[in-house]
Each structure stands twice: as C-alpha cells, then as structure tokens.
Image (spheres, rainbow, N blue to C red):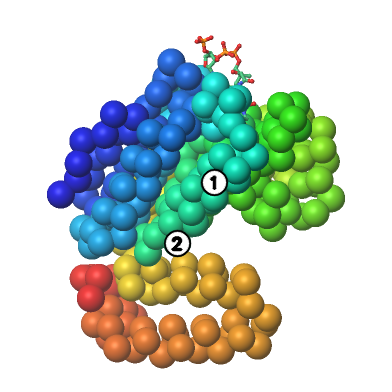
Amino acid sequence: MMGQFENLLFEKDNGIGMITINRPKALNALNGATLSELDALCDQLAKDNSVKVVIVTGSGEKAFIAGADITEMQPMSAVEGRNWGKFGQAVFNKLENLPQPVIAAVNGFALGGGCELAMACDIRIASEKAKFGQPEVTLGITPGFGGTQRLPRLVGKGRAKELLYTGDMIDAAEAYRIGLVNKVVPPEELLTVAKGMAAKILSRAAVAVQLCKAAVNEGMDMDLDSGVAYEAEVFGLCFATADQKEGMTAFTEKRKANFTGK
Ligand code: CAA
C-alpha cells in the first residue's frame, strides 16, 4: 500500500505510477524530508508489480526541482555534507535501478539536484520552458547527487565540464542538442506526451522491458565482453516467459501480440 507523503504526490493509473515532487513554495527543492519520502516510495515501487512505468514531475508551472535545499545545506559541516551527498546518491541510485522504466517529465527549472534527479531517470522529456544546469560552483560546492558522474556519461566530458565549471543554465533546446533530453514538447503537452510514451512501453512485454533496463544499467559499467555476456543471460531468460511465446506466435499468425507481463 502506498503511504501518504507530505512533499510528494503519488498516484497509480493503469500501470503508470506518477510521482510529483510537491514543495512549490521552495520550487520543489529537495530537503531531507522530501528525499526520505522519495527513498521510501522507491522501496515501495521496487516491490509493486502493478506499476510498470514511473513518471516523475514537479508541481507548479515554474520548477521541476530547483536543486537540493540550500537553507538546509548552508550550516553543514564537512562530515554532514558528505553524509548528505551519500544519502542523495543512494536515493538516486535506487531510483535509477528501479525495475520499472522511469520517465522524467521536466516541467521547469531542473537545477543542481533537480538536474541530477532527471539524469537518474531512464528517459527525459522536457517542456519548452525547462531549464537545466549544475549551478553548484556558484554556491561554493560541487554537485553532490551524482552530477559529476552522470552528466559526462550522458553528454560527454567536454560539454559536461563546461556546464560544471561555468554553472550556466541551458534551455530545453540546448539540452536536446547536447543529448541531455530525449525530446522537447510544448508545456501543455508535457504530461500527455510522457503518459503516451509510458503507455507505449506498457503495451510491450514487461519482463523484456525490465531486462533491457537491467542490461543497459549493468552493462554501462562493464567492459564490452562482460556486457554482452550479461546480455546473453537476459536474452535467454526471455525465452522462459509467456510473453516471448505470445510475441513470436502473434508475429507468425500476423496478429497483434497480447502480452500479460508474465
Ligand atoms: N533551496 C532552497 N530554497 C530554494 C531553492 C533551493 N535550491 N531554490 C529556490 N528556492 C526558494 C527561494 O529561496 C524562494 O523562497 P522565498 O520565496 O521564501 O524567498 C522560492 O524558492 C522561489 O525562488 P526565487 O524567488 O529565487 O525564484 P526566482 O524565479 O527568482 O529564481 C531560480 C528561480 C533561478 C531557480 C532560483 O530560485 C535559484 O537560483 N535557485 C537555486 C538553484 C540552485 O542553485 N540549485 C542548486 C542547489 S545545490 C545542489 O543541488 C547540490 C547538489 O548537487 C546535491
């Protein structure tokens, strides 16, 4: 059962789990309480077979997430800063490694921890109004929730270093150009497009989709030989599913597959 949260909204609809970060008075900045709630929600989602795809967005028109909460970080000691970073990293790792695909629907500012959270998602869809950046160096810190690692993996070292060293904000078109987001859509279409993509993924064989995710996530941290060996294992596993039988039978019978997720 899903609990009630103070800083998050969560709803399930036909296999889609919608998470809304909901602290509009602070532009959805991630304070400790919000991160703890997200941590608990990820634990629940990891066990919830009824949710096949997750969408994350921010409440209000202005922000996706304007970063980690600066007022909470301001008095931190070095040890507290390290622990805060480790906590945020652990939560984002959990989000990244949920069995289900996760789509970030980026509705506005995605700065610092907000950009980092979007990068921990599998797919990013941006509103034309979205803005991205890692402004940490303007505050005297480095990114702490994975930004120095996921940004270069997504956009390459040179572009990542420019964003990290300058703290510059980029708009959605530039984020698309450098490969930080998958697509850019008008603000009023953002959730419809995200839900449409989620529905398409939902119509596919769920076990195969989850194994694609595991193979990419595990494989990106391996050498190619190990990665393709991992792929052979998940590929083989698919042949133990009813959906493989159905998918291939449907093809030979020239009809649409009717997947059950089994
Ligand atoms: N933490 C805490 N509060 C925040 C916040 C944050 N990251 N971002 C915005 N807010 C608060 C503001 O303090 C303000 O609160 P009050 O109304 O009580 O004054 C409210 O949200 C609205 O913000 P603004 O008035 O600043 O709105 P704006 O339209 O003038 O500017 C903005 C919008 C450019 C996003 C600006 O708010 C901003 O620069 N925010 C900080 C962005 C940032 O530096 N993020 C990185 C944080 S560090 C980090 O995330 C570390 C990490 O890697 C883990």
Q: Residue at x 39, y 69 (%)?
A: 210
Can residue 5 be seen by looking at this rendering? yes
Q: Which mark is residue 97?
A: 2
Q: Which mark is residue 83?
A: 1
Q: Amino acid at mark 1?
A: Asn
Return the residue nearer the eye: 118 or 185.
118
On the picture, is 180 further left or further right than 25?
Answer: right
Q: Residue at x 54, y 32 (%)?
A: 68
Q: Residues within 10 Å of mark 1 (few under 14, many from 20)?
A: few
Among numbered discs 2 and 1, the one appearing first in the sequence: 1
Please identify the quarter of the rendering in which residue 4 is found: top left
* Position above or below: 223 against 147: below
Q: Residue at x 60, y 40 (%)?
A: 81
Q: What x and y, as percent, mark residue 171?
A: 68, 30
Q: Circle 2 — which element?
A: loop
Q: What x and y, as percent, mark residue 170?
A: 71, 31
On the picture, is 14 further left or further right than 109?
Answer: left
Q: Residues within 10 Å of mark 2 (few under 14, many from 20)?
A: many
* Position above or below: 213 against 88: below
